[in-house]
Image (spheres, rainbow, N blue to C red):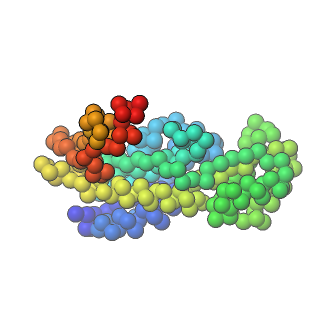
Amino acid sequence: MFFGKSLCIATKHKKEQVLAPLFKGLGFNVCVAKNIDTDILGTFTGEVERIYTPQLTLKKKCELALQRTQTDFVLSSEGSFGPHPSIPFLYANEEHLLFYNTIDFTEIYARYIFTETNFNSQEIHSWEALIEFCKQVKFPQHAVILKSTHTKQIQLVKGITSYAQLKEAYQHLKHNSNVVIAETDMRAMHNPTRMHNIKQLAKKLILKIQSTCPQCNLMGFDIVDSISGLPCKNCLNPTPTVLKHIKKCKGCNFMQETLPSHNLSYQDPMYCDFCNP
């Protein structure tokens, strides 16, 4: 489908390491956008505020790539970190990918919330506390950031990947401040766990790309809605479990019902609001 087509990856942080092999497998000639600064759209450490939604940020990253590259398709990535939206006391990594077709201007979007992340931060008052924090966040395989805020301007050291760098940065910041803040460096090239998550999401995106409309053959024929109501095995009343999915084409608006992946005809009564209120 894509043999000989060009795909540009809009990244500053080496995400092509996991993305390029997957898309080369589809037949793309893959390149990386040269000299684009995606940090102007926001940084994890706060020097540049993130003012756009993830979806809009993805589009703006594609625009940055297209300013420097002529290509058939663009791939952009965006991530965020924080408390899990539904699981208490757990951090999450929300990843987003956008596949943009410059020929017909169609977009295919993928998003997933991962619980696999080392995201963390801590106020540090001693070298021993810093070492313990680093052990918890998988340092030095995963980089850390040290910063102090003793003045109005934040002082920080990013991309620390060795104990020698760690000690030097800590002593420098500690000299001017009683409190140093340690954070995980969440940029993809410094965070193998995040890089793995991006790879897993890319696989999901590729499945969407390969799903074509039965009527017009447009890419990205995907689920737009899910309908609950799988009957209870005991009382036959509808349960909250998904009964069917609705797929819709963005081009011709063709719709199709599909069965969920659980392959169940009935739900266990333990999940029924009538049998187990």
| Left or right placement of residue 88 versus residue 63 in this view | right
| Left or right placement of residue 15 versus residue 163 in this view | left
Q: Quadrant of the N terminus?
A: bottom left
| Left or right placement of residue 123 versus residue 111 in this view | right
In this view, the residue in front, 119 or 13, is: 119
| Left or right placement of residue 34 versus residue 2 in this view | right
Q: Name the spot of residue 144 as percent of width and height, x first.
A: 68, 56
Please identify the quarter of the rendering in which residue 257 is found: top left
Q: Quadrant of the C terminus?
A: top left
Q: Which residue is found at the position 79% from the left and 38% from the top? A: 151
Q: Name the spot of residue 20 as percent of width and height, x first.
A: 41, 65
Q: Name the spot of residue 217 as percent of width and height, x first.
A: 16, 52
Q: Name the residue at the left extreme.
A: 215
In this view, the residue in front, 33 or 127, is: 127
Q: How many marks?
A: 0
Would you say residue 252 is visible in this rendering?
A: no
Would you say residue 86 is visible in this rendering?
A: yes
Q: Which residue is found at the position 60% from the left and 60% from the top? A: 190
Examine the rendered structure and indicate whether residue 201 appears above or below residue 243: below
In this view, the residue in front, 106 or 235, is: 235
Q: Which residue is found at the position 28% from the left and 42% from the top? A: 233
In this view, the residue in front, 102 or 162, is: 162
Q: Which residue is found at the position 64% from the left and 45% from the top? A: 45
Examine the rendered structure and indicate whether residue 15 appears above or below residue 123: below
Q: Name the spot of residue 117 as percent of width and height, x first.
A: 57, 53
